[in-house]
Image: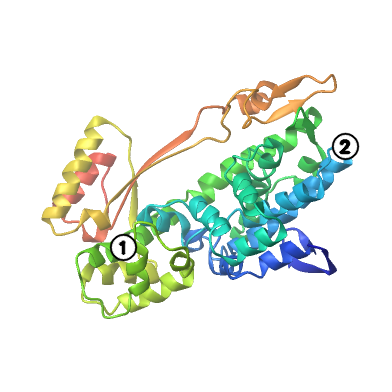
Amino acid sequence: MEPLQDEKVFQDPIHGFIKVTDTLIWKLIQTTEFQRLRRIKQLGGTHIVYPTAEHSRFSHSLGVYFIVRQMITALEKRGTTFDGSERLLILCAALLHDVGHGPYSHSFETVLGCDHEDFTRRILLEDTQINHLLEQYESGFAQKVSDVIAKTYANKLIVSLISSQVDADRLDYLLRDAYFTGTPYGEIDLERILRIMRVENGRIVFKYSGIHALEGYLFSRYQMYWQVYLHDCSRSFNFLIKSLLSRVKALIEAGYEFKCDISSFKELFAAQKVDIKTYLRFDDGVITTFAGFFLSESDEILKDLADRFLNRGLFDELEYLPSKEADQLISQLTHQMSVACINPEFYLFDDHYEQATYDYYGVASEEAIDLIKPDGSIYEISEASNIISGIVNAPKQKNTLFLPLNRMNKETVETLEQLIGRKIDV
């Protein structure tokens, strides 16, 4: 495909003008599959905590495309060359890397028993507008884009621009999510990181002189995960979404007669392999609309969960220390809730989460962040940075119960108090 005669421009609060100069990229942006990303929030339920976090996967995908263009330019200035097809391959993979996300992504995926990356590849390879455009450009091109996103493409340098410890995806979402949540944690020196990028033996390395920009980047990731992505209220809301969708699925399987038309949900949950066109019907607005319909249903659990979803009726969170005794108390709590007719399948979530700032895989690993010194020697960043070495392979762990305390009776509250080691005000 020829370059666009007149470049297209998106005004972006993070990167300024995002320019589109390739006909194929512009046509991909216009597809129904990509436009759907306007209706998928980038941060799922995080807007419950940070009310301005309403930005979409559409804007994030454009941002990743922009940063990859910057990476290509930076590397070409330093002698790395990409032919026309490789350049377009990288840009397409960057633009389309998130196209398979569902509404409230991870909660939706858990109930459906799928992975958004699988749906991304299916959108690229099955009967879709995106597939037709990629194949029109070059037979087999859709498979190449899919391979880059799946990290199976032969040229690992190309893969690393889209998926690595310092990739275009992470660089954009840190900046974008920090901006829209109004937090300072994701502030990173993007220009400096791009300036110190080099290619050595077919792999991305970074000039040693820029180590402080990389240290700042890694700590921004750490802060954003624990202050934003893993915020207790955000996770509580995500569990609430999971519970709501799980109840819909359970009622369908039980033969419950809904008052509203839920044929799309039946198609979604009933099939061994979900039809891609059925999957693409779902976005955040669809889930919200159905939640409003569910308020009129006769099933009390569904009505309650829908009301909580629409009106921020979050589950309470109680952090505890893991142990054999804790496991026994949680098992006891599950039984007590069942006896009290509070279905633990929909009202109790035992959440274990572990997150490292940076995982060290060794200098030979494709996932390592490597630094190159003026003499040509290469060091993995935790070998060169005392700050990073202190956090390597020392992930922070958190164990939390999410449940509605206002529905707990005296017996269940006493069990919870034993579990967390303090009194609870209900």
The residue closer to the viewer here, 142 or 307, is 142
In this figure, what is the number of numbered marks?
A: 2
Tag 1 or tag 2, which sits nearer the N-term?
2
Q: Amino acid at mark 1?
A: Ala
Q: Which residue is mark 2?
A: 79
Front position in the image: 81 or 406: 81
Q: Give the residue drawn at x 63%, y 31%.
A: 366
Near mark 1 (Cα within 10 A), the count class, few <14, some 14-19 or many ≥20, is: few
**Can you tell which mark lies on residue 270?**
1
**Amino acid at circle 2:** Gly
Q: Are marks 2 and 1 in contact (CB under 8 Å)?
A: no
SS class, disc 2: loop
Residue 54 quadrant: bottom right
Tell me the distance, in whole angstroms, between the alpha carbons under discs 2 and 1: 53 Å
Mark 2 surroundings: few (<14), some (14-19) or many (≥20) residues within 10 A: few
Q: Position of residue 268 (x, y in %)?
A: 37, 64
- Residue at position x 63%, y 69% in the image: 31
- Give the percent coordinates (x, y) of residue 316: 33, 55
Above/below status of 15 relative to 380: below
Task: Give the foreground label among 2 and 1.
Answer: 1
Residue 409 against residue 298 in the figure, above or below = above
Q: Quadrant of the C terminus?
A: bottom left
Q: Is residue 58 above or below residue 261?
A: above
Q: Which mark is residue 66?
A: none
Q: Residue at x 48, y 48 (%)?
A: 230
